[in-house]
Image (cartoon, rainbow, N blue to C red):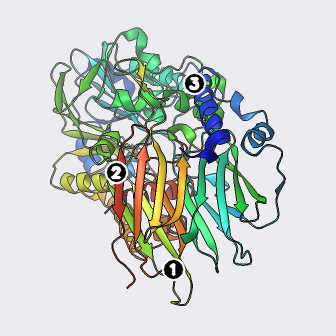
Amino acid sequence: MTQSTSRLGRLLLSGAVAAVTMLSSSYLAVAEEDSWPSLRQSAFGDRAIAEDGMVILDAPQSAEDAAIVPLTVRVPPSVSQRLKSLTLFIDKNPNPLVAKINFGPAAGTGGERSFSTRVRIDNFSYVRAVLETEDGNLHIANKFVAAAGGCAAMQAKDPDSETVDLGKTLVKTFPPALYANPIWSGQVMIKHPNSNGMQLNINTAEFIPARFVKDVVVKRGGELVFQMESTFSISTNPNFRFTFGKGASNNLDVAITDTDGRVFTAQSTPSGS
Amino acid sequence: MAVMKSSQDRPVADPLLSCLGPFVSRQAFLHGAVALAAAPLLHVLPGHAGESLEVAEIAPGIFVHQGRYEVQSAENRGDMANASFIVGNDAVAVIDTLGSATVGEQLHAAVRIVTDRPIKYVINSHMHPDHVFGNAAFKADNPIFVGHYKLARGLGSRADRYLGANKQMMGEAVLEGTEIILPTLSVKDKVTLDLGGRTLLLEAQSTAHTDNDLIVTDSQTDTLFLADLLFSVHVPTLDGSIKGWLTLLDSLKDRKAARVVPGHGPHAMELPGALVPEQDYLSTITTDVRGLIKEGKTLEEAVKVAGMSQRDKWKLFDYYHARNVTAAFAELEWE
């Protein structure tokens, strides 16, 4: 992990402890207290965070399937600055930190930028997106999501088939409707259980060890689009859709590392040309 | 809808049954099909604690309780799926126990009105709470609990969350006594259970509605219990693989059976017609979602439009459909 993770690294660790603690606490009790002030403190210290419309969070009011809740973070075209980072939180999840995305030079400017993924939501919770712009300022968008039917939230529907295909990675690029638009979009998906270490193996009565995607690096022609640290709040078969700046070549190279240290690499097939 | 009263050509295998009033003939059944299924044949007072559930004898010795087209609530106590029991010369097998110990006890009482033969098997068709949460009501009979070999993993790993969500929906009081009871007999391929004079064939399926679906066939009456592999009226719910489910339905088209019992829907239906609406529903979603993926659309966009042409064909559509599309999208985008 990189130097930027010191605070978040601690948060990751505390999340792991929280996950274990939660197993013994009741399902309902978790929904009560407001954990954001302390989360915010541990992630950003005393820095000011403005709710100023520079970042917009799209999430369903109630989750149809709490195991696959689509989240989209958008930065409106009126924001012209480069972006430094984006951090996603789900307050009530066992590990509230979902992911931290550090943007690189190929992330692009000059249009609406966005980042989408799918997450697990364990209980009724605030979801938060904190954007750090190039000037070092922090901007936030919050959304409350009612996770209806969170019962299946942490499981793959067909764990055996997931295991068979583990590591299969698809990378796609989508050129803009107007060729002059400098912003392209891309998608990375990987077959991975992203298991959380909270499931009992009922045959051995032991917890199935956590195994999840912890690092994703996406480059366009050798230049960094983004690097992301992620946790098991990302759904099974992690799926990311994002924008990037148009380059001479718009093929993407992706490297994904999981907590077992396995590295999966993939490239986009040339498209839109 | 009239209650059918013809009983002259119906041999009653169990003398205990004959005191229970009018039964329908097999012929009348075949003619009446779905219409019949909605008519209560065995009049038992509908549920209050301590009483028994209404069941219909759809073929000799085969009794089906029809669940409501609802989501679980304090009022329905988890009575929103079909549950069956089959009476043999020596023993009884129960297929699914409904959504709480409270309502499971009423199912147990319904069995005991019909017969005092031992309940030897409790079969869980799959892991969902509305089919397994009543298991505890049968514990005192010391039956063998039977399920697909993947049921234990599926239900075991979801147990806390199923209990939590159902407590929120039905309240603690209804779930008093409810416990997770996992199978003691696992079906990996096929297992035959002998009830005396009739056998049940249990067949484990590949991932479809869930990854632990079981199909049961009664040898004596050629009745096929499809459980949640067949939804009628109640919108199907997808918690496994849409492709697997469609493949399974396709293979069932060639299967002959005197009747099928759906997991949600009327007491009994006929093949192959019974499968058509569900096949239409799942194929429509598949076609729509594949098209949207090809156009580069996102999951959020797909949820708004895919399969909406099916909206007025199903009950509870608004409650489950978006979830089905979500699951289908997450599966089909890998093609």
Q: Give the position of the C terminus of chain B as an image quadrant.
A: bottom left
Q: Which residue is mark 1?
A: A246
For image coordinates 50% across by 54% down, the residue present is B323
Q: Which mark is residue A20?
A: 3
Residue A99 location (% of width, % of height): 59, 49
Using a 10 Å C-alpha cutoff, classify the residue at mark 1 as few (fewer than 14 neighbours), some (14 to 19) or many (20 or more).
many
Residue A57 location (% of width, % of height): 68, 61
Mark toward the viewer: 3 or 1: 1
Disc 3 and disc 1: Cα gap in Å? 44 Å
Residue A75 showing in the rendered view: yes
Task: Tell me the kind of residue under disc 2.
Answer: Ser
Question: Viewer-proximal residue, A177 or B293?
Answer: A177
Left or right: A217 in relation to A158: right
For image coordinates 25% across by 49% down, the residue present is B30
Left or right: A260 in relation to A15: left
Task: Tell me the kind of residue under disc 1.
Answer: Lys
Callout 3 touching callout 1 (CB < 8 Å): no
Disc 2 and disc 1: Cα gap in Å? 37 Å
Residue B308 location (% of width, % of height): 49, 69
